[in-house]
Image (cartoon, rainbow, N blue to C red):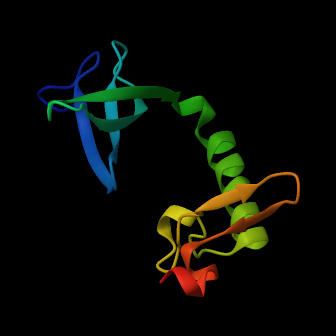
Amino acid sequence: MYENEGENSEIFSKALRAGRRTYFFDIRGTKAGDYYLTITESKKFTHDDGSSHYQKHKIYLYKEDFNAFKEILEEMTSYVFDEKGEEVISEKHQKDFKKPLYTNDKENSSYTIDDFEDIK
C-alpha cells in the first residue's frame, strides 16, 4: 500500500491537453484500499474583461465497470473512425475554411466572399 493511499487519495495521474480542454485521468483509492478512476474534463472560458474560469465535469469509473466501459469506448471510437476517418473535418479545423458571407436556407446554398469576384 502506498504511503498516501486511502479514500480519495491520488495514486496515479495523467493529463491530456486538447485545445481549450484538458482531460485528467486519476487513479484514486477507496476506504477499502481498492482503486477507481476519475476522468475530469476541464474547459477554459475567457470573459470579455480578460478574466477566465474553468468549467469541470467529472466521471467516476469503478473497477467492476472497466471492461464494459472499455469495450463500448472502443466500439464507439472505431465506429467514428470507420465512418468518417481519423482526419478532423470540423469547419473550425479546416485550413481553407471560409466563413459563409450569406446563407439562404430555403435553397440550401451558401456563399463566401470568394464567390463574388467583382467585390475583391
Q: Could you say where residue 96 lies in the image, as x and y percent from the top left?
A: 50, 80
- The reply, left or right, for residue 12 in relation to residue 34 is left
Q: In the depicted view, which residue is nearer to us: 95 or 113?
A: 113
Image: 1 above or below 118 = above
Q: Image quadrant of residue 107?
A: bottom right
Quadrant the N terminus occupies:
top left
| Residue for point 24% across, 19% down | 6
Q: In the depicted view, which residue is nearer to us: 39 or 47?
A: 47
Q: In the depicted view, which residue is nearer to us: 92 or 20?
A: 92
Q: Could you say where residue 73 lies in the image, as x and y percent from the top left?
A: 65, 50
Furthest residue toward bottom = 117
Image: 116 above or below 63 = below
| Residue for point 58% across, 76% down | 87
Q: Image quadrant of residue 90?
A: bottom right
All told, the count of numbered labels is 0
Q: Image quadrant of residue 3?
A: top left
Furthest residue toward right = 107
| Residue for point 28% across, 49% down | 14
Furthest residue toward left = 3
Image: 80 above or below 117 = above
| Residue for point 26% across, 42% down | 12
Furthest residue toward top = 31
Q: Could you say where residue 28 lies in the image, as x and y percent from the top left?
A: 32, 29
Q: Could you say where residue 7 lies in the image, as x and y percent from the top left?
A: 28, 15
